[in-house]
Amino acid sequence: VWKEAMRNLDNDVPSIERSVVNHVQTSLARQAYNLDDTGAYQAAALSVRDNLILNWNETQLLYTKKSPKRAYYLSLEFLMGRTLDNALLNLGLKDQYNESVKHLGFSMEDILEQERDAALGNGGLGRLAACYLDSSASQELPVWGYGLRYQYGIFQQLISPEGQQLEAPDPWLQNQNPWELPRLDVTYEIRFYGNAERLQDGSGRAAWHGGQEVLAVAYDVMIPGCYTKNTNNLRLWESKPKRGFDLNSFNAGDYERAVESSNSAAAITSVLYPNDHTTFGKELRLKQQYFWTAASLQDILRRFKNTGKTITDFPDFVSIQLNDTHPTLAIPELMRILIDEEEVQWDMAWHIVTRTFFYTNHTVLPEALEKWPVPLMEHLLPRHMQIIYDINMIFLQAVEKKYPGDRDRLGRMSLIEEGFPKQVRMAFLACIGSRKVNGVAELHSELVRTTILKDFVEFEGISKFGNVTNGITPRRWLDQCNPELSALISKTLKLEKSVWLKDLYKLKDLLPYADDAEFRKQWVAVKQHNKERLARHVKTTLGFEVNTNAMFDVQIKRLHEYKRQNLNIFGVIHRYLTIKNMAPEERKKLNPRVVFFAGKAAPGYWIAKLTIRLIVNVARVINADPDTKDYLSLYFLPDYSVSLAEVLIPASDISQHISTAGTEASGTSNMKFCLNGGLLVGTVDGANIEIAEEVGETNVFFFGHLAPAVEELRYQHVYHPVPIEEKCPALANVLNQVSSGVFGDGGVYEPLLNTIRQGDYYLLSDDFDSYIAALDMVDKAYLDKTEWVKKSIRTTANMGKFSSDRAINEYAESYWNLESVKVPN
Ligand code: 26M
């Protein structure tokens, strides 16, 4: 009876319609005849979810049965965006569902728009984690993600009429979330504070007791692979009080006190920290980190133990990838469990730990390297602080042995930075506790080896320090966001997308079509269609009428001085002033250009917010100037998100990736633009370099100083400053115009302008002239439309390397030693 009943769902159109209607009537308890788009979305999502659940079950059952080696991706951020369209694509059910909802009187496009983004991340690091989950499942690799189920994702960004960024909460769970399965029975206890006492029995063990105990509850998010039954898991933890509230206080009438501890437990997973490079030292953030790593490790260990294997085999069956230093506490936590609870000896425990973990570094900016005050650690995690001291002592003894008497070196390499207070250097702990350390693009990995971890490379040998260049999933970042281009590619290559979406090097076969005029015409038509889609979006959300005959020039990313949105806006002002000074006939020869910005600033990052303000006010002036508005316009699109990126990226002619050389570890949106046939304006930095290697330097617009020059230039700025009027008159002129109030109260911008006049740490004055020259090259190149389209086609055709499938396979093969486990169809 069971066997007969346990079958796959029927996914013909009539069955899908029945399933959707059934969910309307039962799961939603609504009437089918007055259903709105939101209801239709929810019912369709629940119907699709049924498929995911069956595949998820089958996959997990098979993994349990085969007990293969598994890998776990620990990330505090998963920037997933929307799920419905991705699930439909990966399940191969897009056409069937399109037809079904149409038949039921709805449009799929409208239904998809009903879904809120799952925005549990800040930017590149979180979106990378999401792409890697998609690729792991698609490559049929037994990989789980572990993260936190924040009640509030990245804040919603509003822009005031003055151009000020305002933040509003993102209550993304307000409507029920069909993509998660609460596992209220999967819970673990997590301790904070209290006391740690070393046992006096020579075992090296300690007892940690007292303090606060909270519960971690699992929520599972299904991650379908593309055109495979394999469906992996993303497990997100929610905190809740171990016991409800304190009945004694409650009965005594002290209600506030009664709920106090329960509130503080729930607070742990309440909100994502909205910083993308700085601000450490906040106790709640450290609590999040420990809560999450401790719950994940308990879960991983329980699963491992269920296989019946012995603990010394742990690294042969478990690899754990640390996404930046945020989960570094997993290292002392696994030591604690092995020593205090499993009664493993120190040396064996360290051996197990250092074969289990792998650490990915995502930045070399000194202010972004995570450090935690020792007093805070001691207070919150007393046993872990002991273990870190022990790790450090043993480590420094080994360093001393190799470099006798080199006290400087010991100071440089110590896990504990001297100062008031002393601080724990998380990157060093992650490094010595891991089997491999990698950066995220070739240049970045080289900088990791030669700057922040130089001493460690010398001490441990270079073979531990590698590179895995980032990638992006072509499912979301080509097929879903640009269906017309995807269809054109399939038609031209005479290949089903199920083939080339999983083997992106196949795009190479587009190369000959660059010389095919008919193909070029279709390529241009797709780009035009995408520009019009973006224009409609801008019209409905902002009310502006965008000129779709213009070149679309896009910079979308977190606001940060190192990313140099300032350079872009100063470039726009320069262009505006230039056009303003032209004779009307001269102007008519210009390519009209529309410049788009989008991105959030960390709420406490004052200079970044001032940049937004400048952009908004420059836009107000430029867009209203009758002399120039036909040739140059500028928009700051509020509330940048994954979904907004999906509209912007396919519409771009050029995009800007203009960080000071050596500062952007990789960048991943650069890959997304190029995959969609947009050309890149950028510095010789991060993955820009590898993109240029693949697509050819003639197809990118590089400018600016190179990474090795940066240190010397900064030195010059400090010790031999040249007035900006002398060094870069064009930039000086722009700054003066801003100062003088052409774009509203000039005084407001002085602090921003002063970052360039004084110190100019990110070298705008060194790169401005070559930046303007690069943009002039872009204009020249755009005049030859045929040549431009060829560049666009060749760019897309050469982007195969940047599939996250390639990246995740590198992790699986070179680091995790992981094999795929295919769920039979
Ligand atoms: C720090 C302190 C408190 C709260 C949050 C943070 C924090 C959050 C995110 C720090 C760093 C965070 O991410 C850094 C990041 O996104 N790095 C980017 O990673 C991408 C993927 O590898 C790269 O492509 C980008 O170049 C890199 O900037």
Image: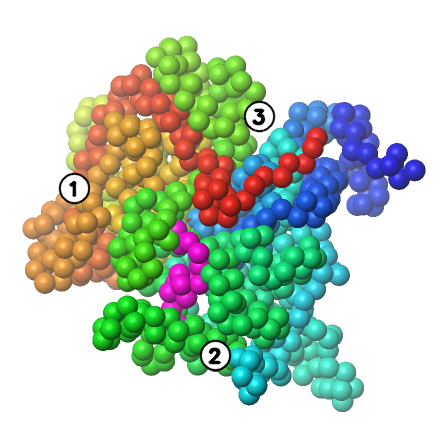
Chain-order first, disc 3 or disc 1:
3
Chain-order first, disc 2 or disc 3:
2
- Which residues lie in the magenta part? 423-438
Can residue 427 be found in the magenta stretch? Answer: yes
- The spot of residue 725 in percent (x, y) is 10, 51
Answer yes or no: disc 3 within 8 Å of ligand 1: no
Q: Which residue is mark 3?
A: 498
Label 1 sits on a secondary structure element that is: helix
Q: Which residue is mark 1?
A: 769
Residue lying at 42% horizontally and 54% vertically, measured from the top left: 436
Residue 114 image-quadrant placement: top right
Residue 426 image-quadrant placement: bottom left
Q: Which residue is mark 2?
A: 386
- The spot of residue 366 in percent (x, y) is 31, 62
Residue 49 image-quadrant placement: top right
Label 2 sits on a secondary structure element that is: helix
Q: In which quadrant is the C terminus drawn?
A: top right
Front position in the image: 696 or 822: 822
